[in-house]
Amino acid sequence: MQNLYDTVKKAQMVVQVEAVRVQKELAVAEFDGYCEGELIKATLSGNQQPVRIEITEAAMELGSEKLSELVTEAYKDAHQKSVQAMKERMSDLAQSLGMPPGLSDGFKQ
């Protein structure tokens, strides 16, 4: 029984170490999102934190309401890419740790 307990504890440690590694990778990763026409570029980290927004002169000339819409569109695009990357990395982690396929499917959208 002690052997089983030791095996489970080791497995928990491996999962924790690997999860931290994936989180660190995602924290430094950057994902760019664009609005239609690529007038705005929003950059988010892999853990969905805003990094920067780049606005072209052409976008500035469209007025505040349209500019707001374009920034939101670019942000949503970057967010979707960041979330998708996170889900893929977590799914890959689950599979590499030998978790049953059905369990890791919960990470994918």
Image: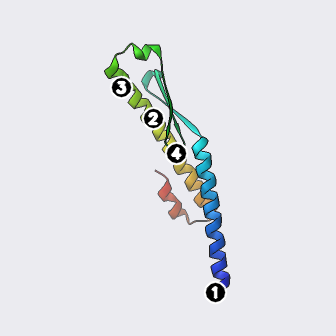
Label 1's element? loop
Q: Which residue is mark 4?
A: 47
Query: Which label's residue is closer to the chain start, 1 or 3?
Result: 1
Q: Residue at x 42, y 36 (%)?
A: 76
Give the mark, 2 or 4, whose residue is nearer the N terminus. Answer: 4
Q: Marks 2 and 3, Cα distance to the nearest angstrom?
A: 14 Å
Q: Gap between marks 4 and 1, in whole Å? A: 39 Å
Helix, strand or loop under label 4:
loop
Look at 60% across and 60% down and name the residue there. Answer: 95
Q: Which mark is residue 68?
A: 3
Give the x, y percent position of residue 63: 34, 16
Q: Which picture quadrant has residue 6? A: bottom right
- Tell me the crowding category of disc 1: few under 14, some 14 to 19, or many 20 or more residues within 10 angstroms, Cα based: few
Please give the residue where the numbered disc 2 appears in the rendered image: 77
Mark 4 residue crowding within 10 angstroms, few (<14) / some (14–19) / many (20+)? many
Which mark identifies residue 24?
none
Is the residue under label 3 in contact with that under label 1 (CB below 8 Å)? no
The answer to whether the residue labelled 4 contacts the one labelled 1, judged by CB atoms less than 8 Å apart, is no
Residue 57 vs 3, above or below: the answer is above
Which residue is pictured at 31% across the width and 22% down the height?
65
- x%, y% of residue 69? 35, 26
Q: Earlier in the sequence, mark 4 or mark 1?
A: 1
**Helix, strand or loop at disc 2?**
helix
Upstream in the sequence, badge 4 or badge 3?
4
